[in-house]
Amino acid sequence: MISLDNPRDSAEQVVSDLLRVPAPADELGRIFADHGHTLHLVGGSVRDALLGRAGDPSDTSATGGTGGGAPDLDFTTDARPERVLEITRGWAEATWDAGIAFGTVGLARRGVRFEVTTYRSESYDRTSRNPAVTYGEGLQEDLVRRDFTVNAMAVSVPGHDFVDLFGGMADLARGVLRTPGPPEASFDDDPLRTLRAARFEAALGLTPVPELVAAMRSRASRISIVSPERVRDELRKLIASRDPVAGLERLVEVGVADLVLPELGAMRMEIDEHHQHKDVYAHTMTVLRQAMALEDDGPDEILRWAALLHDIGKPRTRRHIAGGGVSFHHHEVVGRDMTRRRLMALRFPKDVVDAISSLVYLHLRFHGYGSGEWTDAAVRRYVHDAGPQLSRLHKLVRSDCTTRNRRKAENLARAYRSLEERIADLAAHEEIAAIRPELSGDDIMALLGLPPSRLVGQARAYMLDVRFERGLLGREAAEAELFRWARENDIVIPGETPTPDEAPDA
């Protein structure tokens, strides 16, 4: 234990300088002290302060949040949840009790969000998806049940005593990841910690000690009892971390990926003796790194997932060709469907599923561009099908080039620059980024006197094809094209007298 306000030597002074306790923490601590309770700042709040990461609310890759949902400050206390709500009534401007069954109360004041958890321990039985929570009586009992030593440090408020019972600060300095107690017991308490270990390796660069890796491997199957939503949240934070490749490779190594992302390990395909195709797994990790290098403003989760999953259809579509070749025909179609099924099983939001699976489906289309033989219509279709994902598609296609053949890489880059230039040129003359028929469904119904029906959809699809093939025609020419289509399909145009051949039978 170190008193941050009265360091005894230079080493303690260093810790004191790093651990600047936020004023709101002391304010809340005084309320608890006045009511006879203890309060400690704990977990990620203390760890990040020691790492110099405190005060960066945008970086949630190694915190408890999923981006926008993480509390600003985490605390532990001897007060039960109902008591926390009672003594903070009138001080907290907002409260939430979604986690009260697990001993956690959320508070907010002056734009700062606090999460206060009663001393506790929790464990899973062999079949339960939800942990059984029991309250503890002391700080040490609470800290020993935490996932890793780097999260088992605490600072009392308002007293400012730093507590590090399990060597968390030393582990941070050494760059290692350990559990406060036996790792097997920790992973039995909460199997999700096998995923969290990989995430902390990815986000903080902490290398799991050998006994931790062994426990991850021996307890891998336990992840199957954890809810898909909790698994999803961990994976989303891992993919958004500083080095997701490190975490993903760890999950594959210990077998956890076989249960949460089995498609990932399946890409470790043997390379045939003639080296006719790359190791898809290694290629995928390279593509992910290259996609990250093209990000504009922080982690792009959708781009990263698309890079990770873009080739997951290859193992199912691999065919050996006479003469030693290998083909992966339609792997983008298979991959799109596999991506959609996996992300939906993990309860990803629908818009995220749609965006990622669309990119997986489209990532190969550029290779039909060749040396620029596409018509303007084909370029318009490319932009239309990419829709709002066009910018990401550009980055994904560029990242997908991992060849060591310099001439081939230069040719691919030159061809894609050509495509981008054509897209920009068309965009300068028409609204290519939002291609739609010049006549809306309402226009078509009014012009042809049709009620809502399948015919209206067919007419709109035809007008969209016209838009692709011929660009913007103008209103008058677009209406003339619609009428031409209607006559070809025996649709009577209001105000026109049908010819005898077109007249309906009596």
Image (cartoon, helix red, strand yellow):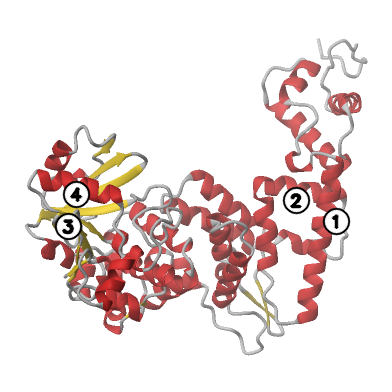
State the CA–CA distance, disc 2 to disc 4. 58 Å
Q: Amino acid at mark 3?
A: Gly
The residue that mark 1 highlights is 374
Residue 188 visible: yes
Circles 4 and 3: CB atoms closer than 8 Å = yes
Q: Secondary structure at mark 3?
A: loop
Q: Between residue 183 and residue 25, name the one nearer to us.
A: 25
The residue that mark 3 highlights is 159
Residue farthest to the bottom?
273
Q: Between residue 388 and residue 258, name the one nearer to us.
A: 388
How dense is the environment of label 3, judged by Cα within 10 Å: few (below 14), some, or many (20 and up)?
some
State the CA–CA distance, disc 2 to disc 3. 62 Å
Q: Is residue 22 left or right of residue 306?
A: left
Residue 29 circle label: 4
How dense is the environment of label 1, judged by Cα within 10 Å: few (below 14), some, or many (20 and up)?
some
Q: Which badge, 2 or 1, is on the more N-terminal residue?
A: 1
